[in-house]
Amino acid sequence: MAARRLRAVRWAAAAAGLVYLGALGVHGPLDAAYEWIVRSIPESGVFRELYDFGGVFAALLIALATALTARAKALGYVALIAGALLPITWLIHPPSDLWVAAQTYPHPTIAAPAFSRVALLPAFQPLQLRTGAGDGADPDAIAYPGEVAALNDYLPAYPVDMALARYEREGEADALRALGVSRIVARPWLVSRSNGEIGLAASSLASPRLSSATQRTADLAGAAPLISGCESARIVASVDRLHPCDMFFGDAPGHLAVTPVHGASDSIDPSVSWIDARLAFARVPALAQGIGGVLTQSTLANPVTPGAWLLAYVRGRLTGSDGQTLAASPGAFTWISIPPSVDSVSCVGLCELVAESRFFPAIPLHQSVARTRALPFDQLAPWLYRVHGVAGSVRLVRLNERYDPGWTALRAWHVLPHVRLALAANGWILTDRSSRDVVLVQITAFMQQIAELVGVLCVLSLLKALVREPTKRA
């Protein structure tokens, strides 16, 4: 019995040591093994909070302490004293000391038109007080009366990251207007710990500098409405500076498919490899677009499809595998015809490879911008809208929310074709003109409501059966 207990203690001690080392993650001696697990077993990403292992480590320590007190009675008094001191230490220095009370710092007054958005500055989380206290999520990124919402996300993606970064870096608000932002709210008592940077990703790029515009609150005129109508959709081949009713040709029905470029490496350092371009959108808003792609500052070659058309951003020079210069630019997006003899490209400067297409569409270079107008609507639920006045010259209905295939439009019970507008928003082509009203519904949320209703009915039916036929006891 004693030998078995000794073996259990040894196993518990070994497990405690292993759990402690594992909880250190990439900062401990098992960093290489942990990195291999995360990269090779994607399912391991479900469990990311390594500090949760601290609870397992504490439980193992308790088990070890229990076993030791069984062998040495004097240690039992030590455990008793430690147990008595624990609540005292919590009273002297409670966990609440690590939090900053909401009433101890200012909060902005939010006043904006209904169904519009506000942009909070500093824009990127986590945030802390300028005094150095606190650290965490934005306390003001909530919904406000009048269906006014904050644009800010904890981990913003395109186009939110681009729009916020472009305003903070350059003071340019056009992208914010396109996202329905009617008011910019400055909070000088807060500072951002990230400024849009994602850890060490793309750290070799220039450090962002904040514009003086970020220090003041301002109203924005001309914010895009939540629901609007477009007279037409302008088919474009560009991916930056898009207008609300522009449609990238790869998203247009019947057009050729456009394939995003993927890198062969999972590196986050563009100075030595090709990395996921989305990691750098907040650092360099000029690179942002809604497709993806890869970018680099290195001279490492990246494979491309011979004979295809390549959409790329070049700040410097892009060279083919045959040594010929394919593009040279001070910084712009361009379509490049890849020669049949070229199977890879390399960069001198900063290059972003976005997408490939087997053919380049015949799109007029000069097209007029499609006119838009706000459409009246009723919000029946956050996931359900009834749009009125869809008639006349309106050819598309636009919902200014992030594109989601779950959004569906019905007109006279006919499902309308769903398209992506400006590489970001939801749009529907009005193929049926038998009614002036269009119903927009988020199918996933609708099915969730149905499932919850069914669950409530099931509980009520069970309660009714229980009342009518009570459980018999022996």
Image (cartoon, rainbow, N blue to C red):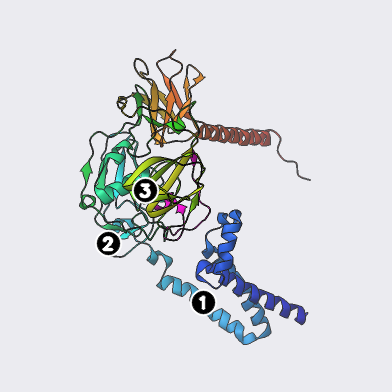
As shown in the figure, which amino acid type bears the numbered disc 1? Ala
| Figure check: 283 above or below 35 | above
Type of the residue with mark 2: Arg
Labels 1 and 2: the sequence-earlier one: 1
* Residue 108 visible in the picture: no
400 over 322 or under it: above or below: above
In percent of width and height, residue 106 lies at 26, 54
Q: Earlier in the sequence, mark 1 or mark 3?
A: 1
Binning the other alpha carbons within 10 Å of mark 2 as few (below 14), some (14 to 19) or many (20 upward) gives few
Q: Secondary structure at mark 3?
A: strand
Report if residue 129 is visible in the image: yes
Q: CA distance from mark 3 to mark 2?
A: 38 Å
**Amino acid type of the residue tagged 3 in the rendering:** Val
**How far apart are the two marked residues, 1 and 2, measured between alpha carbons?**
39 Å
Q: Which residue is mark 1?
A: 84
Q: Contact (CB < 8 A) between labels 1 and 3? A: no
- Closer to us: 188 or 334: 334
User: Which element type, helix, strand or loop, lies under badge 1?
Assistant: helix
From which residue to which does the magenta span run? 259-280
Q: For the N terminus, which image quadrant?
A: bottom right
Q: Residues within 10 Å of mark 3 (few under 14, many from 20)?
A: many
- Residue at 51 percent across and 67 percent down: it is 26
As helix, strand or loop, the secondary structure at mark 2 comes to loop
Q: Which residue is mark 3?
A: 314
The quadrant in which residue 270 appears is bottom left
Question: Of the residues under marks 3 and 2, which one precedes in the sequence?
Answer: 2
In the rendered view, does 301 fall on the left or right side of 74? left
Magenta span includes 67: no
Depth check, mark 3 against mark 2: the one in front is 3
Q: What residue do we see at 32% from left, 59% from top?
A: 207
Q: Residue at x 34, y 21 (%)?
A: 231
| Labelled disc at residue 130 | 2
